[in-house]
Each structure stands twice: as C-alpha cells, then as structure tokens.
Image (cartoon, rainbow, N blue to C red):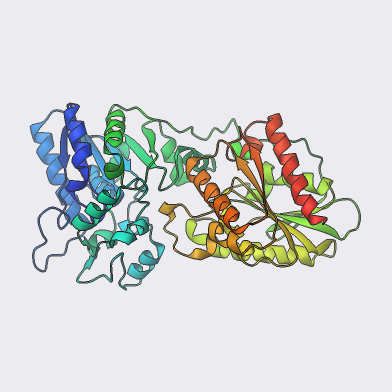
Amino acid sequence: MTVFILVAGAFTGPYVWRDTAARLTAQGAEVHTVALTGLGGRPAAPGEAVDLETHIADVLAVIDSVAVGSGGDIVLVGHDYGIHPALGAADRRARSIARIVHLDSGLPQDGVPALAAVPDQRLREELTEGGGGGGGGGARAGELPPPARDAWSRWGSTAGLSEAALDGLTALAAPQPLGTLLQPLRLTGAVATVPVTGVLCTGNGPGIELVQLMVDLGEPAIQALADPRVTFFELPTGHWPMLSCPLELAEVLAEAAAGRGHRLKPADAAEPPPHLRPFLLDVAERPRERTGNTDLYLPEGPGPHPAVVFVHGGPVPAGVRPTPRDWPTFTGYARYVAGHGAVAATVDHRLHALTDYERAAEDVAAAVERVRADPRVDADRIALWFFSGGGPLAADWLAAPPAWLRCLAANYPILAPLPSWGVEDARFRPVRAVARAGTLPVVLVRAGREMAEIAATVDEFLAAAGRCGADVEVVDVPEGHHGFETLGPTEEARDAVRRAVEAVLARLTL
C-alpha cells in the first residue's frame, strides 16, 4: 500500500488537499495531510518563533507516526513552500521515504532559504532588506499576511481556479510565519538518494520540454534532473492543481508513486545537444569580425549596408560554452543574411537568470549603437531579431521604436513573463508594449508545435496586436518545434527561414 504525506504551500493548510486526498483514499492509498504550525496546525504559542525547523518537525512527526504504524511505501508530496519542510524532513528520514514529489515547486538547495523560491521579486527584495511586504499588506509581528483575493497571482497563476475556489482559498488562508521563509534549509545530502518526481503546472511555469532545453544547455545544477530516478508529469493548469483539477492530480500522484513518468534525456558527450546541431540551411562562410560581445558578418561591397542584429534567448548560464553567438542557429542566420546583402550582428548578452533582463537590455542597446556606428552600416536601416527567452527584450523597442528601426522580428518568442517568474515590472512585456509600436513592422515566426506555456504568450501578443492594428506578419511553421532550426531539417522549416529573412530584408529596403 502507498502512503501519501501531503504538505501544503504558503498561507494554506490541509484543507486544500480535501478532494485529492479523497480520491487517493478511494483508490486504496493511505493519506495524511500535514498540519504545519500556524498554518492549520497548532497555533504558535505567545512569543514562539516559528521557523522552517518548526515545520520540518511537523513533517517529521507525521513520517514517524506512519513509519511505526504502516508497512507501506511513503510518498512525500510538497507543494510550493511545502517542499522545503518536506525535503528537510526527508533528509533526516531518507530510508523511510520511497519518493518525493515536487508539486509545482522549486529545487531547494542546502543553505538557501525558501524566500529565494518566492516568485514575487519585489517581495523578495523587501524581505531581504528587512522591510515589509506581501499580498495583503506589510509584514507584521514576524508574519506575512496572506494575499488579498486579487493578489494570489503574485504567488502563482490562478488559471483553472473557479470563483468559488478562489473565494475559499482567500477565506481560509493564514499568515505565513516569516521565519519559515527566511531560515536557510539545511541538508546533509542524504535526501539525494531518494527518487524524485516533478509535477509541472504548465499554466504557471515551464513544462517538460523547456526543462529538457535547460538540461541540454549543460547547467550543472540542472543535470541532476536527468537522473533515471527522476520522473516528470505535466498538468495544464495553474499553481494550485489540488483546487483546479484535484482528481487529475490524484491520478498523477498515483502514477508517480508507481515510478512512472517522463524521464529527461541526459547530455550525451558523443552527440551535440539540439542547440549545437547544424543549421538547417547550407550557408556559405562570410567574413566575421569580433569586437567585445558582438560579431559582425559582412556582405560583399563597401556599403553602407542595412543591418540585422540577432538577440539570443535565455536565461543561458554564465558558464555555457560556446556562448550563444557561436551557436549554429545564430551563425547560420548571420551568414545567410550577410549573403543577401545586409550586415548581420550576433550579440552575447548577460541574461543568465530571470532577474537579468535589465542588464541584458543594456547589453543589447549598447551593441545596437556599436553596430550603427560602424561606417559600413547604414545607421538608418536596422532590424532587431529576437529569439525565445529574449522575446521580453523586444518590449523596449516596441514601446518606443526609433525612426531607424525598420523591422522587429521574433522567432518562437516568449512575449510575456510566465507567471512563475514573479516579474511585476511592466517593462519587459511585449504583449503590452505592442500597443505603442505604431507603424513598426513585426515579423513573427511561430512554431506550430510550440510549448503550451510559450504559445499562450504568442496568442496573447497577436490578440493585442490585432486590437491596436499593429503591422504583424506571421510566418508559420506548422510542424516546427521551439528552436526548429537545429532540430532536424525539413523543407517546411527551410522555407520558413527563407520567408522570414526575405520579409525582414524587404522592410530594410523600403
């Protein structure tokens, strides 16, 4: 028999698990919901400091009671903040736990407090600096007030929640003791031996395909996710699946307990990862000049020529080699554009984390000015071409397009921060900025087999563009995936690249 121990996230308690627990019980499982101190468990005593260790002790008490009274396999499920006390307890009872399920939660590390995983960037900064903050008012008396009804989205997407569920979530929420967010998690490493399942809610953050791309980039901290003991599931909902799709969640948890799920492909030294595979077009070499973080690919003739600046996506870990400007997608596009009479520029920028968009924007702006200053470039005929996670960087140029910007292009872009990013700043939201784009032509290359979470931002952008009458040309790749240029050459994909380049260059010659 499987024994599920369910640990709820910030501001919530055992009540959120009601329908999921009932379904698991009906299927023959034993289910325990952990009542954390101050969050559905015993109230904190006057003057008691409730911290992460307090909640770890709460989880340990349930594990120990189950281990004594049952011979079943214990599956420990942590949602949101709940993964922190769950991992802390599992680290001390690793031999008792058959599997840990990260339910739309992060990957806590030793020595890092739960605050680091809070999606609300502004709140992280306020609490780090010792100030107040929170969804419903300032932190007080060592606790963070629960969000107001319209502020839950600062903690995760509310997609899929009914009005009644949102009302209930708000009515039953409790203040979160600040110590639970600020005290670092301490792990001995014993928990690393326990098999893991990640349940990704794609209405809130990345799905399996995007996580695989992160593994392919070679980031050491992410490589562990390709361990064969790690499995994944997706749920097409927001951050609270136990309220938005409780029965589906129960089915996924049962599958996870059985060791099923999707396994990521580890990096293979014998085979290049997708982003380093050959470009789908056979393009001739062009003269290339490297200055700082920018490479120029030069066409025939003295010029001045129009120029296309290619802006890679991300985040890309700082230690990744080769850097994006040497990836086949960007060298391929640059050579192809230079072969058709325009200067092409590829840029390395510092989008290494989700908090880096501002400095990445500075890098791109500086590179554009450097390109425009080159005497071989016609400074009044420039196109900017953004890719993937670089999409949010297009917002500045859409919001206030300079006269010399003749075209803005984007391939399989993210055009609004995903809910799990916790980005409140309106600056990097092309879905809003397009209303101020005026007559700036936009060429959007859309992958038909795009990840759902990214496709949603593209749909939102096109809807906004339609409302304001923006000049958007869509180049569809119906069978294309995210990063299709190096995922296997097809005539459809080749044709899409040719059409997109032709569309951009046509705008530069008007």
Residue 253 spot, x, y in % from top left: 28, 33
Give the quarter of the figure containing the N terminus: top left
**Which residue is painted at 69% across and 60% down in the image?**
440
Q: Nearer the viewer, residue 71 or 152?
A: 152
Q: How many marks?
A: 0
Which residue shows up at 27% across the image and 44% down it? Answer: 243
Q: Quadrant of the C terminus?
A: bottom right
Q: In the visual, does 130 lie left or right of 298?
A: left
Give residue 367's quadrant in the image.
bottom right
Which x, y percent locates residue 348?
A: 64, 55
Question: Would residue 281 appear left or right of 258 to someone viewing this image?
Answer: right
Residue at 15% across / 58% down in the picture? Answer: 38
Report the side of 240 relative to 362 (left or right).
left
| Front residue of 48 and 267 | 48
What is the x, y in percent for residue 213?
52, 41
Question: Is 378 left or right of 100, judged from the image as shown?
Answer: right
Given residues 217 and 338, the one toward you in this image is: 338
Question: Is any part of residue 219 visible from this angle?
Answer: no
Residue furthest toward the right?
301
**Location of residue 379 (image quadrant):** bottom right
Whether residue 294 appears in this view of the structure is yes
